[in-house]
Amino acid sequence: MISASRPERRVPSARKPGSLPAQDEAALWDMEERFWTGGVDSARRMTAKGAVFVFPYPAGILQGDALWRERDVAQRWRSVVMSERYLTGRGDVAVLAYRVSAERSGDPICEALCTSTYLRDDTSWVRLTHQQTPAH
């Protein structure tokens, strides 16, 4: 018996649930690093209006203009190393979790566990939340 062969059909590779395209992942990690090392104006542009940040005491929970007056947010770090990186995303929401070691003049090295939540707003990502827990 002779069977007619069908042309092979290429099926696009399926992404695992909770994953984002590689270019989005790279862009998000780049934004997160720039949040630490770029100027306050850059951080403000990458952050959604009404975003909520949670810092260790005494800064605490910050929202709105208070974000940009707080020293921990307004003063940039000269170097940052992010390790133990995790990223999950669904649709237009992405969550980054990582360990950071950051340094700036006059301060002890900051060792923290962090999370940031991003929302895709039209064609760009903006930060909705950021949280830091001391890791020492």
Image (cartoon, grey):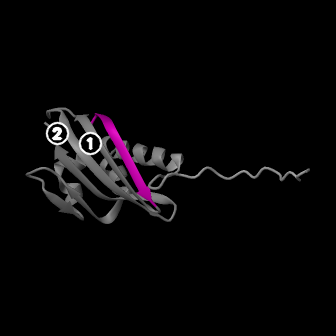
Q: Residue at x 47, y 52 (%)?
A: 19
Image location of residue 65, percent across then percent down: 23, 63
Location of residue 117 by image quarter: bottom left
Secondary element under disc 1, as helix, strand or loop, is loop
Query: Which residue is at a point 32% across and 35% down the rendered structure image?
Result: 83
Q: CA distance from mark 1 to mark 2?
A: 19 Å
What's the residue type where badge 2 is placed? Ala
98 left or right of 126 in image: left
Few, some or many C-alpha atoms within 10 Å of disc 2 (few <14, some 14-19, many ≥20)? Answer: few
Upstream in sequence: badge 1 or badge 2: 1
Is the residue under label 2 in contact with that under label 1 (CB below 8 Å)?
Answer: no
Q: Position of residue 70 (x, y in %)?
A: 17, 53
Is 126 or 65 nearer to us in this picture?
Answer: 126
Q: Residue at x 42, y 56 (%)?
A: 89
What residue is rendered at 40% in x and 52% in y? 88
* Magenta-colored segment: predominant secondary structure: strand
Q: Which amino acid, mark 1? A: Arg
Q: Is residue 94 above or below residue 64?
A: above
Q: Is 43 positioned to the left or the right of 125 in the image? A: left
| Residue 88 belongs to the span the image colors magenta | yes
Residue under label 2? 135
- Residue sitting farthest toward the right: 2
Tell me, yes or no, whether the highlighted magenta stretch contains residue 130: no
Which residues fall within the magenta stretch? 77-90
The percent position of residue 82, horizontal first and vertical second, equals 32, 37
Label annotation for residue 76: 1
Q: Quadrant of residue 90?
A: bottom left
User: Under tag 2, what secondary structure?
Assistant: loop
Percent x, y for residue 71?
17, 48
Closer to the camera in the image, 102 or 37: 102
